[in-house]
Image (cartoon, helix red, strand yellow):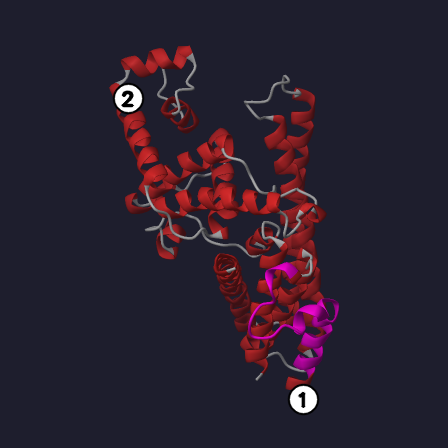
């Protein structure tokens, strides 16, 4: 039953990235690569997290639906806040660039710094709340394993990112 | 007068230091030694063969450098320096200087806030940009090669959830497609 449930979850996550599922063991030629948006990669990462969490946390039938819902909230919260932070940091970088030809706009800098501080406070509170919601579903050991799982998965994601870049670089050199 | 900041060391190594700070440099043996060491290191890096670039170093470590700079001007934020060890501090110091130098002087393929649609594939222009970027990566990757995960973590460079997804925005369309293939393989293996 649990394997069917896992399969359904994974397939649901894959729906929007169906084109990528058709890939074989070897990547397609460089000139035929469709443009895959980062959002679709995120959904694949989510599928990885769900599959790993199901195994690592040994979720019960009762826990699973609540956990998945709250996990989505956590991911959405984190992504929204990270996106805003990246934009604010880019603004700050642009506004404070020492090599800029125009004089710095102090009012704009102050406003962006204030927005960053507000975002950091709000982000911390929202993430804490999202984690608390997840913790309510999990027992103590599962809570600990979930934190460890998230960090381990982050490393795996980076390893995959590096492999993807290296594979493409090798392919390009062979062409 | 205070010693040169990391940014000023880079400026000095590139001959861009302001006259006022140049006077300090001429009088201060400590700063002269640092600038001399940095210049030699940058010269060596530019002339040495380089390994393949990694997407980790640019996004993740430059973010950490920005955090460190912010922490420096906010005394209420603890540095946690007591936890750092010299084996980690030395490569990180070099890395921080190089990241600053790279940000200031080298062309970038894309920025974190760049619109996703701006990432195109296949054009000659795009290819040239990528190759230039590879060289940037290579310099960094070559110099921080000895910086393994354990050392990086000891220096406070631990990954936090969400970091990797920021790097996705730095990938080209081809790399994202390859990444999706690799993830799919992982999921297939997990399922079976």
Q: Secondary structure at mark 2?
A: helix
Return the residue at label 2.
B32
- Label count reads 2
Instruction: Return the x and y of residue A15 as percentages of the image width and height.
Output: 74, 71
Displayed quadrant of residue A93: top right
Q: Confirm whether the magenta stretch covers residue A26.
A: yes
Residue drawn at x 52%, y 57% is A172
User: Magenta stretch: dominant SS?
Assistant: helix
Crowd around label 1: few <14 · some 14–19 · many ≥20 (10 Å)? few
Answer with left or right where residue A168 lies relative to residue B144.
right
Residue drawn at x 41%, y 10% is B20
Instruction: Return the x and y of residue B96 as percentages of the image width and height.
Output: 42, 37
Q: Confirm whether the magenta stretch covers residue A54.
A: no
Residue found at the far front of this picture: A175
Residue nearest the viewer, comparing B139 with B61: B139
Answer with left or right where residue B132 lies relative to residue B21.
right
Q: In the rendered image of this protein, does residue B144 appear above or below residue B15?
A: below
Q: Tell me the magenta residue range.
A: A5-31
Q: On what subunit does the disc labeled 2 rest?
A: B
Q: Determine if residue B74 is in view.
A: no
Answer with left or right where residue A116 lies relative to residue A143.
right
Q: Please identify, in this view, whether the residue under mark 1 or under mark 2 is nearer the observer.
A: 2
Q: Secondary structure at mark 1?
A: loop
Residue nearest the viewer, comparing A136 with B62: B62
Instruction: Return the x and y of residue A109 as percentages of the image width and height.
Output: 65, 26
């Amino acid at each position: 039953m649990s394997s069917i449930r896992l399969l359904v979850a994974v397939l649901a996550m894959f729906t929007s990235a169906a084109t990528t599922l058709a890939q074989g063991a070897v990547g397609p030629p460089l000139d035929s690569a469709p443009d895959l948006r980062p959002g679709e990669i995120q959904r694949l990462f989510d599928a990885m997290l769900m599959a790993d969490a199901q195994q690592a946390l040994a979720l019960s039938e009762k826990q699973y639906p609540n956990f998945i819902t709250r996990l989505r909230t956590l991911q959405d919260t984190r992504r929204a806040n990270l996106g805003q932070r990246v934009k604010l940091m880019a603004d700050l970088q642009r506004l404070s660039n020492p090599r800029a030809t125009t004089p710095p706009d102090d009012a704009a800098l102050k406003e962006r710094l204030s927005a960053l501080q507000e975002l950091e406070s709000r982000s911390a509170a929202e993430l804490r709340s999202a984690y608390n919601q997840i913790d309510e579903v999990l027992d103590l050991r599962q809570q600990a394993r979930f934190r460890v799982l998230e960090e381990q998965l982050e490393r795996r994601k980076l390893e995959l990112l590096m492999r993807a870049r290296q594979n493409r670089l090798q392919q390009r050199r062979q062409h | 007068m205070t010693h040169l900041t990391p940014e000023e060391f880079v400026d000095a190594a590139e001959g861009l230091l302001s006259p006022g700070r140049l006077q300090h440099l001429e009088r201060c043996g400590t700063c002269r030694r640092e600038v001399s060491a940095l210049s030699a290191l940058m010269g060596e890096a530019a002339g040495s063969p380089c390994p393949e670039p990694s997407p980790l170093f640019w996004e993740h470590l430059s973010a950490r450098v920005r955090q460190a700079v912010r922490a420096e001007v906010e005394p209420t934020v603890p540095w946690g320096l007591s936890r750092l060890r010299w084996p980690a501090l030395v490569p990180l110091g070099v890395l921080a200087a190089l990241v600053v130098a790279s940000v200031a002087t080298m062309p970038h393929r894309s920025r974190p806030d760049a619109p996703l649609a701006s990432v195109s594939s296949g054009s000659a222009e795009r290819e040239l940009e990528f190759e230039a970027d590879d060289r940037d990566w290579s310099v960094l990757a070559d110099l921080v090669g000895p910086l393994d995960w354990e050392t990086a973590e000891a220096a406070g460079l631990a990954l936090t959830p969400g970091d990797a997804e920021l790097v996705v925005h730095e990938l080209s369309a081809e790399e994202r497609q390859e990444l999706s293939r690799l993830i799919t393989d992982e999921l297939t293996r997990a399922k079976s």
